[in-house]
Image: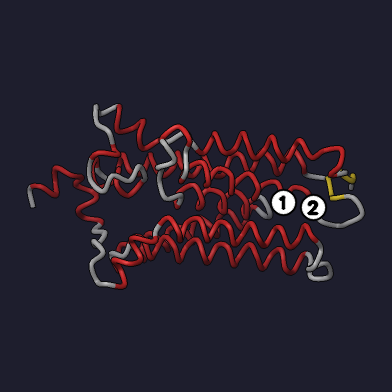
Amino acid sequence: MKELSLSQSWYWFLLIAVVCYFIGCFNFAVILAKARHKDIRKIGSGNPGTMNTSREFGLKVGFFNFVFDCLKGGVPALVCHYIFRGYCFGGTVILVSDFTRYLAGVCVVIGHIYPVTMRFRGGKGIAATFGLFWFGIGCENPWYALIMAGALIGVVVFIGVTEMGSMGSLLGVAAFSVWQGMIFYLRYETALFNVWVVLLFMLMLAINFLTWFSHRKNLVRLFAGEEHRTSVKKLHRGNRGMKNM
């Protein structure tokens, strides 16, 4: 295992943060809506994300939006994992790849929620976060990727049964964070107070804070009993189908 010196390689982390932030600013919901001569930010809920895209254009378009956003969150993390695989921080057993893939993911999510290209008014980061965990946990073990796929299907089923899109998404993010956190805990249980391990867990918390904070209005409406239900049947029909109901 090669050692990486922060004093000599700090610019890598800065580069990851900047590049991944701008990757996050690339909004697929806006692009897909423009292909249909509409601005997703001016229709429906105004949120440039998977759920609003599904409501306005149907599940097929929403599915493509979800996949593209998942790739946006997951691919940068996977690239960072393989670039720094085989390195540990100097004087420790902490894998650099563990840190860089979640640094990349958090920066993508920040760029998605607060894109400078859209006056800092972006989506809510759920699909990008799911992609981050799918690739981030999946690279630990190929079987984890399959389990993650099943877990994502479970989230979809939960939303379909309860019609609580926001809550289902947020619970999924929290569950995946705990899963990855447990892996890190078991891996570094003898070095839990190492600064890099602490930063790893802070990145897990940051992911949850960003996604939950971006849903704060949804949560207020949910607790007040005013949150709109997420009907899969209506999503399948899209906006035109809902108008005819």
Three-letter residue code for mark 1:
Phe
Image coordinates for residue 96, horizontal then vertical, percent: 78, 48
Callout 2–callout 1 Cβ contact below 8 Å: yes
Residue 22 as seen in the image, left or right of residue 162: right
Residue plotted at (40% across, 45% down): 123
Q: Is residue 163 left or right of residue 19?
A: left
Q: Secondary structure at mark 2?
A: loop
Count the numbered circles shown: 2
Residue 82 % position (x, y): 72, 40
The disc label shown at residue 99, or none: 1
Res 13 quadrant in image: top right
The answer to whether 227 is drawn above or below residue 71 in the figure is: below
The residue labelled by disc 2 is 95
Q: Looking at the picture, which amino acid does disc 2 mark?
A: Leu
Report the front residue among 91 and 1.
Answer: 91
Above or below for 162 versus 206: below
The answer to whether one can see residue 161 in this image is: no
